[in-house]
Image (cartoon, grey):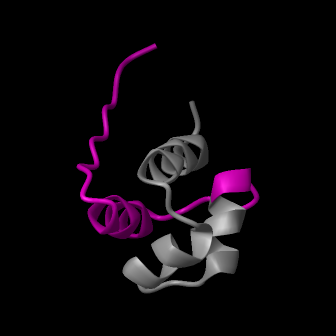
Amino acid sequence: MTPGALIRERREELGWSQARLAAAAATTQAVVSRIERGAASPTVDMLLRLAQAMDSELSLTLMPH
């Protein structure tokens, strides 16, 4: 699952609009939309802000092939 899909899934679980998430994460609705659609590759900092805004934890895992 892509980062954008994970963000969208959690946002929808909360019943939040993209605009509400954007306001909570100090960004714009357009940025949230691009991330969710996979049109933008978010930085780790942005993913952390989005996760924290949704009272969620960001976990990254690096695994060998």
Q: Quadrant of the N terminus?
A: top right
Looking at the image, residue 40 sits to the left or right of residue 3; the answer is right
* Residue at the image point whose x is 59% and y is 84% from the top: 28
Of residues 13 and 24, which is closer to you in this image? 13
- Location of residue 60 with respect to 32 vertically, above or below: above
Please name the predominant secondary structure of the magenta segment in the image: loop
* Residue at the image point whose x is 33% and y is 60% from the top: 54
- Location of residue 12 with respect to 20 vertically, above or below: above
Hey, which residue is sitting farthest top in the picture? 65
Looking at the image, residue 31 sits to the left or right of residue 26; the answer is right
Percent across and percent down for residue 43 are 47, 64
Q: Does 51 lie within the magenta span? A: yes
- Location of residue 46 with respect to 57 vertically, above or below: below
**In which quarter of the view is residue 47 placed?**
bottom left
Looking at the image, residue 52 sits to the left or right of residue 43; the answer is left
Of residues 57 and 64, which is closer to you in this image? 57
Percent across and percent down for residue 16 are 50, 62
Percent across and percent down for residue 7 are 50, 50
* Residue at the image point whose x is 59% and y is 49% from the top: 4
* Residue at the image point whose x is 59% and y is 42% from the top: 5
Counting labels gives 0
Span of residues in magenta: 36-65
Q: Does 44 lie within the magenta span? A: yes
